[in-house]
Image: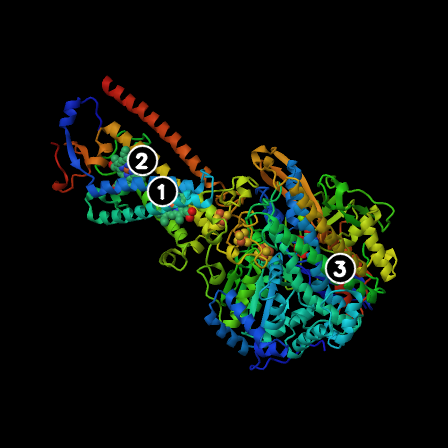
Amino acid sequence: MPTRIVVDPITRIEGHLRIEVVLEGNKITDALSSGTLFRGIEKIVENRDPRDVWAFVQRICGVCTHIHAIASVRAVEDALDYRIPKNANYIRNIMTLTQFVQDHVIHFYHLHGFDWIDVVSALKADPAQTSALAQSISGWPLSSAGYFRDVQTKVKTLVESGQLGIFANAYWGHPAYRLPPEANLMGVAHYLEALNWQKEIAKVHAVFGGKNPHPNYLVGGMASAININGNNTINIERLNLVKTKIEEAQTFVDQVLMPDILAIANFYKKDLYGGGVRNYLAYGGVPTVDVRNPDSYLFPGGIVLDRDLSKVYDIDLKDPKHIQEFVTHSWYRYDDPQAGLHPWQGRTEAQYDGPKPPYENLDENKRYSWIKTPRWQGKPMEVGPLARFIIGYARGNQRMRTLVDDALKKLDLPLSALFSTLGRTLARALETKYSVDHLAGFHADLVANIKAGDSAVFNPDKWDPSTWPATAQGVGYCEAPRGALAHWIKINKGKVESYQAVVPTTWNASPRDAQGQIGPYEASLLDTPLANPDQPLELLRTIHSFDPCLACATH
Amino acid sequence: MNDSSVSRSEHQALRKQVYVWQFPVRLFHWINALAITILFLTGIYIGNPILTPRGEAYQNFIMGQIRAWHGIFAFIFIANLLFRLYWFWAGNEYSKLRLWRKEFWGDLVATFKYYTFMTREHTLHLGHNALAQLMYFLFIWLAGALMILTGLAMRSGEDPGGVLYSIFGWVIPGFRGEYQVRNLHHLFAWSYPLFLLGHLYMVFRQDILDDDGTVSSMINGYKFELVGSGESDNSSLPEDMLSTAK
Amino acid sequence: MGKQGGVKLPSSDSFYRWARSKGVTRRDFLKFCTLAAAMLGLDAAAVPKIVQALETKPRMPVIYLNLQECTCCGESFLRSAHPLVADLILNMISLDYMEPLMAAAGEQAEAAKAKTMKDYNGKYLLVVEGSPTLGDGGIYCTIGGKTATSILEEAAAGAAAVIAYGSCATNACVQGAYPNPTQAVPVRRVVTTKPVIDVPGCPPIAEVITGTIVHYLTFDKIPELTNQGRPRAFYEHRVHDGCNRRAFFDAGQFVESFDDEGAKQGWCLYKMGCKGPTTYNACAVTQWNDGVSYPIKSGHPCIGCSENNFFDNTPFYTHLADIPNGAIGFNPDKVGVGALGVAGVGVLAHAAATGAIKGREKEEKKGS
Ligand code: HEM
Ligand code: HEM
Ligand code: NFV
Ligand code: SF4
Ligand code: SF4
Ligand code: F3S
Ligand SMILES: [Mg+2]
């Protein structure tokens, strides 16, 4: 007798995600993923000044803060054929990689950590053994027995108080937790350290964008003027601040994150469920030279179908047949509800016909989500760090290959192990390493370019709307922490005529399409076991491995 | 009535000089005109500061200066209007503004018809006609109140612990934020040149058509009235308010 | 193990005892109190009060709701440096419900919230990030099958006080901008029976929200508010009045185009559309990310993110916004000049008509 279980809210994510699964025994036989928040930002930016739009759409999400602004200014720049100075490109890259590192670390420890780390088990740990474990895998200085004892005491006092706060009511002691108490204690300590550290790397955004979250951007470049002899501009003090934060980040990733992921993965390496759909997509991103030159991208773009790494397909974001969004199972109105629309033709008109709240269940045969259903040539695609690494690997990116091969070798796992919940989480950690290592490079590029006498950060040529054509359309794309992101804009007489964003979590969390094909979240749950249906820990683990962002997905 | 079939000398003989604008009204008028002119010019400058001096910041104080003058004339403007409010009560018949009187609305219709050429003759006034009164009410009193309210609210924000703030602070949340207050202040500033354009046109037109001394009246206080025309709406005025031509 | 404890703190327990039991020295504790005082803008005389408060108070339960939002405010909260957010949520308050951070999910998460609402009825602090939405019966934001708006109403009913955290909560922010497709409204519109403290910003500075919470913990009452309902300590003054570019404003030295000579001298961003002159926020003084910068310092004009309506006070890069708003409005100067032009033409036409008609009248009279 199949039972239906609902997890809503899915916590430790951004936004409001509802998962319903049909369970036969301990096996999930069907799954439904629903985004339950809608704001209508695509409608709100209509008729506005295209130069303003980045600020509106940046508010699509504050967890992957900054990235929608990048997509937006690029969309406008693409439409207007607007080139930006070298320095602006370097600064945007520094900010993007900073965001990757910060977001991925927060995700690993604070959003995903409790899926692997049992806090209550940490109370049983021997601090001396924890210290030995920590020192055996890393040179991170905070590793004495006394230190771990303090952390343990902190948690113990909390638990004993009865006011458990954020630790209350979780699945502690669940059989799917596999770490020994000592590793759990180390994990808890790093949870707290990461919480303190993440605010430091965010300072890089503050230097160039004035604040984090939601730093400022500018169509045509950046607003942070460079004058190395100025006292109210980007000068050597500012550059040094950035450099210091990058170096600290490098240390943190090398000495805390990387050893942790490998240690944890080692205990979970038999749990290779959660692979999901077999297709992977990346638009490509972080242009070392120029966004017009995809060969210069740090993250190569492309498509891998059916997990076949021998062939990578190209994507054309402007081709109406490549990318389409369906609303067959979403609460929106299209003239033809079965049709898929390319984003330049796309529409966002809410039309709710779901159950009246409060409700018990949604129905996968009807419309059940505020998330639209994007497809590449009709196929569902997984996006994100795993997709980027698979495509990078298939494209022959040496650095990515080495990172993957080394990690898998250490874990004694085959390449196919990547197609799993654990693989997704591992790929994200590898990407953090890949990103942090390139940060220093872009900082050096920026300094070298300034040294060569180029201090421009903004190109004024096309700032004035009177220089624009009467109509124009463009697409701005990039890789966001959670995957491929693009915004499509149409400009008419200096105003936004239409605006559509197709966002990483839209791809991953999408409901069924017109053909009834399920999306990555739903597919990944089909082979995720549940040891105890009352405590769906593995379900959370698989869903969290995508790092869901629902504000992004629905916008 | 500018009846050109009457010779110039005959015309003179038929006219009586009337003391309409008492000195306080004239003084008010010219202070008001000066204050508004300066407020508008400095205000627009604040909105569009076009001069960009070189050198160190401490050597220059252009924006600060302009804002200071805007502030000074703002308070002159306010004081002047307050005085005029008093003079509505203390002044002569011509100094009043009585929108609530039945005659006012009848006159408004008649004057409107006159200005749209639907009738040839206008009602006779030594003070201002109803349309003019309405314009003063809208552009000087209503717009002025709005400018003062929004202006003082913005000013009060500089010292949120201060007296001004306790009186006018409510305006800011009232308009959903100071930016809207400021934008409205700027938008309504345009009502003044708009008024001035109409005002000057009407004043000079009146003077030319009727040759009644309207323009000079705001300087010396006197206007001319046709004697015995029987059309005067001022026949009920006390004698001492009318003075005969020398 | 794994159970939510039913043990309530004995009323004699305090933050100080708590801290001591965790090995915090009295010296560290006093240092913390001094810092907290400095942050709240209090003088040294207030320190003993804080010390005393923290020595006698139990940890306050906090329910943090996420409604219609982007979670940036939550992210900003995590960036708090003083107090460190870890200190706040583990030692100073009991963060019993906050979707992005809490370990429990689904029913268990909802149960944790229900328990706090019951056990601490009238005593918990409710922090709300995001806007309630009234459109079509609230279906634009649901959690656990319930509308976010009903969840807010329910949670507010038993709260001691409500903090509307971030511009979404205080003014509906971007989703409330024209045409506000989901009828997003400020928290105040829904919560009418409890004191609501507005902490606006998109997002607010980290230390502003943690400071507001600590103020409440420390002094046992809500902070003094401005007439816009915001803590005076952070929102009393305009960004402009403490701006590091203010000297250039008064001098009249303005950036005319991004990255021009003025920009490279750090001149004032007024002509680039800076909303600092009308924006009440602590950015210029407290600054962001532990004092690193704030938008204007890094060369971008303030967009007025703590103000009502700021997403309709656009376009951003002009001093004057379109009226009534950036999606359907007109620039006030264009309206003014346009009206003046029309009036000018009207006057000329009227003068011409006067000349013609009066001329004809004269002819008629002559002819008669
Ligand atoms: C900013 C400029 C001006 C403003 C705001 C202004 C405003 C006013 C106001 C409020 C009145 C009504 C007086 C009262 O009842 O207290 C008035 C009357 C008058 N003003 Fe002005 N004025 C301006 C400029 C001028 C100028 C430049 C002239 C002359 C060339 C002028 C001539 C007159 C005359 C003759 C009257 C009496 C009009 C009548 O009989 O209706 N004004 N003005
Ligand atoms: C005839 C009356 C007035 C006119 C035409 C006028 C016009 C203006 C204009 C055009 C601005 C620029 C707004 C902008 O673009 O930011 C301005 C600003 C301002 N006005 Fe007025 N104004 C008038 C009366 C007043 C009054 C009575 C006050 C009262 C104190 C006042 C106080 C201010 C203030 C505080 C500002 C902002 C300037 C700043 O802080 O930089 N104004 N005004
Ligand atoms: N999905 C998503 Fe984002 C990311 N990464 C968007 O572009 O998180 Ni809010
Ligand atoms: S106020 Fe701004 S930053 Fe905060 S949640 Fe809303 S959109 Fe995000
Ligand atoms: S930059 Fe903005 S806030 Fe700063 S002085 Fe200029 S106008 Fe004021
Ligand atoms: S945009 Fe917001 S962050 Fe501060 S400087 Fe302006 S209020
Ligand atoms: Mg979209």
x and y percent of residue C335 in the render? Answer: 45, 38
Helix, strand or loop at label 1? It is: helix
Residue sitting at x 70%, y 66%: A191
x and y percent of residue C215 in the render? Answer: 51, 68
Mark 1 Cα within 10 Å, few/some/many (few <14, many 20+)? many
In this rendered view, identify the residue nearer to me: A373 or A286.
Answer: A286
Frontmost of labels 3 and 2 is 3
Residue lying farthest to the top in this orientation: C367
In this rendered view, identify the residue nearer to me: A268 or C353.
Answer: A268
Question: Any atom of ligand 2 within 8 Å of the CB at mark 1?
Answer: yes
3D distance between C-alphas at marks 3 and 1: 64 Å
B62 lies left or right of B93 = right
- The quadrant of the image that shows the N terminus of chain B is top left
x and y percent of residue C87 in the render? Answer: 61, 69
* Amino acid type, mark 1: Leu
Which numbered disc, 1 or 2, marks the residue that appears first in the sequence? 1
| Mark 3 chain | A
Q: Which mark is residue B199?
A: 2
The answer to whether tags 3 and 2 share a subunit is no
Q: Which residue is mark 1?
A: B39
Mark 3 Cα within 10 Å, few/some/many (few <14, many 20+)? some
3D distance between C-alphas at marks 3 and 2: 77 Å
Helix, strand or loop at label 3? It is: helix
Does residue B244 appear in this view? Answer: yes
Q: Quadrant of residue B29?
A: top left
Question: Any atom of ligand 3 within 8 Å of the CB at mark 3?
Answer: no
Frontmost of labels 3 and 1 is 3
Q: Which residue is mark 3?
A: A254
Q: How many marks?
A: 3
- The quadrant of the image that shows the C terminus of chain B is top left
CB contact under 8 Å: marks 3 and 1: no
Frontmost of labels 1 and 2 is 1
